[in-house]
Amino acid sequence: MSRTPEQLAADQALTAAIEQTLAAYSDGQPWVLTEYVVATSQQQFDDEGDSVTAVGILYRDGNVPLHRALGLVDYAAVRMRKLAAEDDDEG
């Protein structure tokens, strides 16, 4: 599926923003960004004023193979659970 010029520009801007953020938080060692999955939460209101929430997922260049995306998300979730468990142990 081909992407629009707007999608291409947005993908390039997102990748640049992620690379800039990684560099700002790095220990000075060079890293090469290979893939990413960004999870989003969005909210809007329908015609009756009721809140509608959606969850979205953005992939690098609009597409990452599903098995790799699931691996990234699952691994990140495991790391977050570990951090939460360590936080609970300290509290």
Image (cartoon, helix red, strand yellow):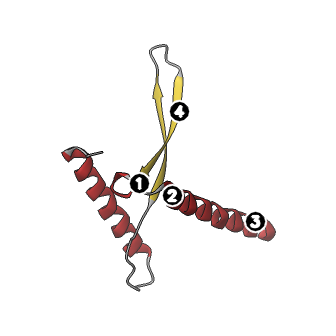
| Residue linked to disc 4 | 53
**CA gap, disc 4 and disc 1:** 20 Å
Answer few, some or many: residues within 10 Å of disc 2's Cα (few below 14, many 20 plus, some between 14 and 19). Answer: many
**CA gap, disc 3 and disc 4:** 28 Å
| Residue linked to disc 3 | 85
First in residue order: circle 3 vs circle 2: 2
Q: Residue type at mark 4?
A: Thr
Answer few, some or many: residues within 10 Å of disc 3's Cα (few below 14, many 20 plus, some between 14 and 19). Answer: few
User: Could you say which quadrant of the image residue 36 lies in?
Assistant: bottom left
Q: Are marks 3 and 2 in contact (CB under 8 Å)?
A: no
**CA gap, disc 4 and disc 2:** 22 Å
Residue 59 coordinates in the image, percent (x, y): 41, 54
- Front position among marks 4 and 1: 1
Q: Secondary structure at mark 4?
A: strand
- The correct choice, above or below, for 2 with respect to 64 in the image is above
First in residue order: circle 2 vs circle 1: 1
Q: Residue type at mark 1?
A: Tyr
Q: Residue type at mark 3?
A: Ala
First in residue order: circle 4 vs circle 1: 4
List the single residue furthest toward the left. Answer: 5
Q: Are marks 4 and 1 in contact (CB under 8 Å)?
A: no
Question: Residue 20, labelled with which disc?
Answer: none
| Residue linked to disc 2 | 69
Residue 82 coordinates in the image, percent (x, y): 70, 67
Residue 24 coordinates in the image, percent (x, y): 39, 73
Q: Are marks 2 and 1 in contact (CB under 8 Å)?
A: yes
| Residue linked to disc 1 | 59
Q: Residue type at mark 2?
A: Ala
Closer to the camera in the image, 36 or 50: 36
Answer few, some or many: residues within 10 Å of disc 4's Cα (few below 14, many 20 plus, some between 14 and 19). Answer: few
Q: Secondary structure at mark 1?
A: strand
**CA gap, disc 3 and disc 2:** 24 Å
